[in-house]
Image: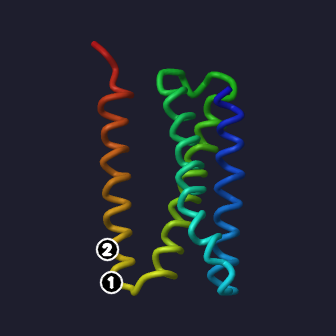
């Protein structure tokens, strides 16, 4: 089942990224609903990717399919971060957008550190 989540996450992230680029490059007043729903779409895709990483947390990368699905989940998270960054800069001034990026990546760094030190830690 996590395999389907990995593929869904990547495709949703790609769709969100393309939609974000189109909305920013070709602004339209009728796109307000799209801009409103994009963060929720990004969050859903990131949740699916996090679920994949969680499901495979104790499985070795050499196991068939595990490495690829982890790579899909990470690619999804990267595309979602890029989409979010584009939205931040499109909707805010540069100072607030940079502050938002610092907060976002600081939170992601803390999550990654916790994931590596707590979840992936080898029990002695």
37 lies left or right of 124 = right
SS at mark 1 in the image: helix
SS at mark 2 in the image: helix
Identify residue for label 1: 95
Please state which of residues 122 and 91 is positioned toward the viewer in this rendering. Answer: 91
x, y percent for residue 30: 69, 81
Please state which of residues 14 and 117 is positioned toward the viewer in this rendering. Answer: 14
x, y percent for residue 27: 66, 87
Identify residue for label 2: 99
113 lies left or right of 5 = left
Q: Quadrant of residue 82?
A: bottom right
Quarter of the image where the N terminus is located? top right
The alpha-carbon separation of the residues under discs 2 and 1 comes to 6 Å
Residue at the image position 50 percent from the left and 61 percent from the top = 81
Colour convention? rainbow
Decide: marks 2, 1 in contact (CB < 8 A)?
yes
x, y percent for residue 10: 67, 49
71 lies left or right of 53 = right
């Amino acid at each position: 089942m996590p395999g389907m989540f990995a593929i869904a996450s990547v495709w949703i992230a790609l769709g969100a990224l393309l939609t974000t680029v189109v909305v920013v490059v070709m602004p339209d007043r009728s796109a307000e609903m799209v801009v409103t729903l994009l963060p929720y779409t990004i969050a859903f895709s990131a949740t699916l990717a996090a679920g994949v990483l969680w499901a495979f947390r104790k499985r070795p990368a050499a196991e068939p399919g595990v490495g690829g699905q982890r790579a899909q989940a990470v690619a999804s998270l990267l595309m979602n971060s890029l989409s979010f960054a584009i939205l931040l800069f499109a909707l805010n001034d540069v100072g607030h957008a940079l502050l938002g990026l610092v907060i976002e990546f600081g939170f992601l760094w803390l999550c990654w550190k916790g994931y590596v030190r707590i979840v992936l830690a080898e029990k002695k």
